[in-house]
Image (spheres, rainbow, N blue to C red):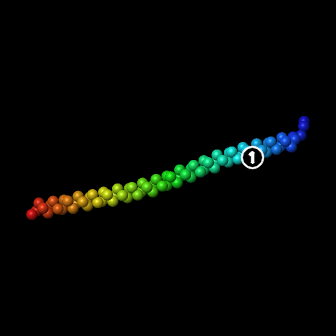
Amino acid sequence: MKAPSSFDLTLAISAAVVSLSLGGCGVAETGAVAAAQGGTAAEQAKEAEKTKEKVEQDIAAAEQAAADARAKAEEEAGQ
């Protein structure tokens, strides 16, 4: 049996480094994508909350306008 040469050892170490580097890139990329999607989801939640508040304000304004119109109609009917 022959002892591994320095070339064989260097080749094995190089292959291990390349494998780990590529594996690490995939993990980092997955983490970056997840973080970006998480940020997007948070932004969407904030926008949804703003939209909900605006809709609630619009509903309150419409209810007030309807109440004012009823009051005016009742006042005119009583004269």
Q: Residues within 10 Å of mark 1 (few under 14, many from 20)?
A: few
Residue drawn at x 17%, y 62% is 72
Locate residue 79, reporting x and y percent.
9, 63
Picture quadrant where residue 57 is located: bottom left
User: Does dot 1 land on a helix, a strand or a loop?
Assistant: helix
Quadrant (top left/top right/bottom left/bottom right) for the N terminus? top right
Looking at the image, residue 69 sits to the left or right of residue 60; the answer is left
Q: Is residue 79 left or right of residue 39?
A: left
Which quarter of the picture shows residue 5?
top right
Residue placed furthest toward the left: 79
Q: At 21% across and 62% down in the image, what residue appears?
A: 68
Q: Residue at x 71, y 46 (%)?
A: 20
User: Which residue occupies the extreme top position in the image?
Assistant: 1
Say whether residue 11 is left or right of residue 76. Answer: right
What is the three-letter code of the residue carrying label 1? Answer: Val
**Residue 28, horizontal then vertical, whole percent:** 63, 50
> Residue drawn 49% across and 55% down?
42
**Residue 20, above or below 66:** above
What is the total number of numbered labels drawn onto the structure image?
1
- Horizontal and vertical percent position of residue 74: 14, 61
* Rendered location of residue 61, percent (x, y): 29, 60
The part of the image, by quadrant, that contains residue 71 is bottom left
Report the residue marked by disc 1. Answer: 17
